[in-house]
Amino acid sequence: MFLILLQYIRPVAAVEHFMEAHTAFLQKYYDNGKFILSGRRKPKSGSLILCQASSRKEVEQIMSEDPLERNQLAMYEIIEFEPTAYATAPAR
């Protein structure tokens, strides 16, 4: 399992220009079961993605398709971890 932290490296206005394409990228990997959740950081400085992949190399390949990466708008930190506990039902 991987946690991907995105940090914008360009002004938010530049990032927002590519947000529709970024959303389509995210949906592609939700549809094939690789992405589990994603969300914006607060304050709006980037985002995070929880990814299920077989290797760091696979995550790097996936992220190379992100329009934010292709247009040098964000940098990524990829953190691999092994889940050892989880809640059986989300807190409400």
Image (cartoon, rainbow, N blue to C red):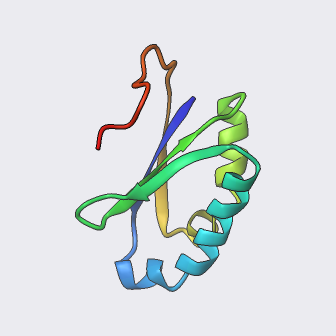
Residue under the image location 23 percent in, 64 percent down? 43
Residue under the image location 71 percent in, 35 percent down? 57
For residue 64, which quarter of the picture? bottom right
For residue 24, which quarter of the picture? bottom right
Residue under the image location 39 percent in, 65 percent down? 8
Indicate left or right for 76 with 1 as reference. left
Q: Could you say where residue 37 lies in the image, as x and y percent from the top left?
A: 51, 48
Residue under the image location 72 percent in, 28 percent down? 54
Image quadrant containing the N terminus: top right
Q: Is residue 50 above or below residue 15?
A: above
Q: Could you say where residue 67 lies in the image, as x and y percent from the top left?
A: 63, 70
Q: Could you say where residue 84 lies in the image, as x and y percent from the top left?
A: 46, 13
Indicate left or right for 62 with 69 as reference. right
Q: Is residue 3 above or below residue 8?
A: above
> How many tags in the picture?
0
For residue 6, which quarter of the picture? bottom left
Q: Could you say where residue 78 lies in the image, as x and y percent from the top left?
A: 51, 38
Taking depth in this image into account, of 61 and 48 the one nearest to the observer is 48
Indicate left or right for 17 with 27 as reference. left
Image quadrant containing the C terminus: top left
Taking depth in this image into account, of 52 and 85 the one nearest to the observer is 85
In the current view of this chain or complex, which residue is farthest to the left? 43
Q: Is residue 90 above or below residue 84?
A: below
